[in-house]
Image (spheres, rainbow, N blue to C red):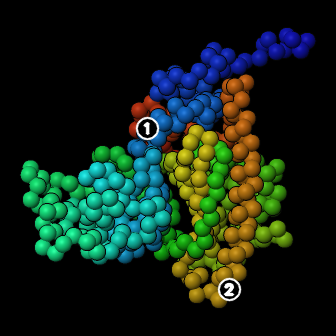
Amino acid sequence: MTAETTTAHRVDPYAALPARPVDPARFTDESTYRATRLPVELASTLIPDAYTAPEFFALEQEKVFATSWVAVGFATDVDRPGACVVVEVGGRSIIITRDRRGGLHGFHNVCRHRATRLLAPDAREVGKRGRIRCPYHSWTYDTDGTCLGAPLFEGSGIPAGREEIFDTSAAKGFDRADYGLLPVAVDTWGFFLFVNLATDPGPLATQLGDLPERFLDYQLDRWVPQRRRTYDVAANYKLVGENFMEYYHLPSVHPELNQVSKFSDHYRWQGTGMYTGMCTTPVSRNTEAGGWDGLRPLSSLGRQDADSGRFVWLFPSTALVVLPNHAFVLLSRPIAANRTVETAVLLTHPESLDDPDIANGLDQLEKFWDLVNRQDLEIIEKVQQGIENPAYRGGRMCFRFEEPLHRFQNMIIDRMVGIDRVPAGDDDSMTRVFPDSA
């Protein structure tokens, strides 16, 4: 058979598609994704425009990020009344804080007077006297979102006795009770803070599925962030996630990690919920290149948890790694179709806090995770460069190693076409990828 004849008989699942048109209507049409909706052993990857088109990115912000529970930070960042964090979800700036009674609240970072942004991105306290005060006209809000009006003008130079001119209580047809901060749903699980921009969101527990039960013995709500790093990534956030979900690339991209995370020790660890999960067991010891040792393990874990690493991608944009002695988190914030800002965080369990060698242990872990993450970022930026080439129309899944990608991409498709569902998990709690290697 000649080369020409062979080429003529190849099946291209994208042959019927137009040449990379940018038509936003396509992105909410189920038929656009027919190749990815096939069973994983037949499926092709998500359309390239999902990683490159600004129009897809804009729709995704609304249909995925504005409708999901998104992990944005850590509960310890708002551990007392008046403490706050300012985060961004779906292009909106959000304030998360605690009121005087310790209640957790989320608000759009917008003054109800003339829409001024209230707090800076690096704010860690709401302001003087535990109140949120607009920098433009001094409209002031309590930490429960209540509008206090604009009665507080300390140091403003307003003549004594004339403050009533600026007192909104005398304004006609105005009731401060109607002008509190615009609320946003917030919740916690383990050490995470979550935000949901939807007007009437379902419970966080529905999205998490069986994860709280699976991580019950770790007591994640007691773990503490210790080290943080930020990475600016020239790639779509989904490429960050899809790279995290599979270990197909370990031998070629991570020679050091491949020594402590062997192919034969990987399992699919997938239950019901908006996540993808895998497990490595047993946890391998460090090599000269580093590894996951460095701190003592949590003593209360059962036999299986005490010798396993859990790797979970929380839909839509967060990596969670929990090992017996530490946790590693990647919070991925989409900035544009081809740009993501990652915040990488190392966390420790409470038993490690009194370890006299904790600093050295954290140094070792941080160095190893930084090496692994930089290797990942280098390769996914190359993927972004390739996927932007109009000649690329999509590729085939490798079903053995890329099933989690298929699951994730179909979650994205669901939201883009308006389907709200939580995928089911496997019958077995852990499924060995190489059955003959047991």
Image: 189 above or below 54 = below
Taking the spot 58% from the left edge, 74% from the top edge, the residue there is 226
Q: Closest to the observer: 8 or 273?
A: 8
Relative to 199, 35 lies left or right: right
Q: Which of marks 2 and 1 is nearer the N terminus?
A: 1
- Badge number at residue 211: none
Residue 430 placement (x, y as % from top left):
61, 54
Taking the spot 27% from the left edge, 63% from the top edge, the residue there is 138
Classify the position of the N terminus by image quarter: top right
Q: Name the residue under label 2.
A: 357
Residue 55 placement (x, y as % from top left):
52, 31
Crowd class of label 1 (few under 14; some 14 to 19; many from 20; radius 10 Å): many
Mark pair 2, 1: CA separation? 46 Å
Q: Please, what secondary structure does the residue beneath circle 1 have? A: helix
Relative to 24, 98 lies left or right: left
Taking the spot 40% from the left edge, 67% from the top edge, the residue there is 84
Q: What residue type is labelled 2?
A: Asp
Q: Closest to the observer: 96 or 409?
A: 96
Residue extending farthest to the right is: 2
Q: Name the residue under label 1.
A: 63
Q: What residue type is labelled 1?
A: Lys
Task: State the image quarter where residue 297 is shown.
Answer: bottom right
Classify the position of the C terminus by image quarter: bottom right
Q: Please, what secondary structure does the residue beneath circle 2 have? A: loop
Q: Closest to the observer: 259 or 92?
A: 92
Residue 7 placement (x, y as % from top left):
82, 15
Image: 379 above or below 38 = below
* Residue 409 seen anywhere in this rendered image of the structure: yes
Taking the spot 79% from the left edge, 51% from the top edge, the residue there is 253
Residue 170 placement (x, y as % from top left):
9, 59
Crowd class of label 2 (few under 14; some 14 to 19; many from 20; radius 10 Å): few
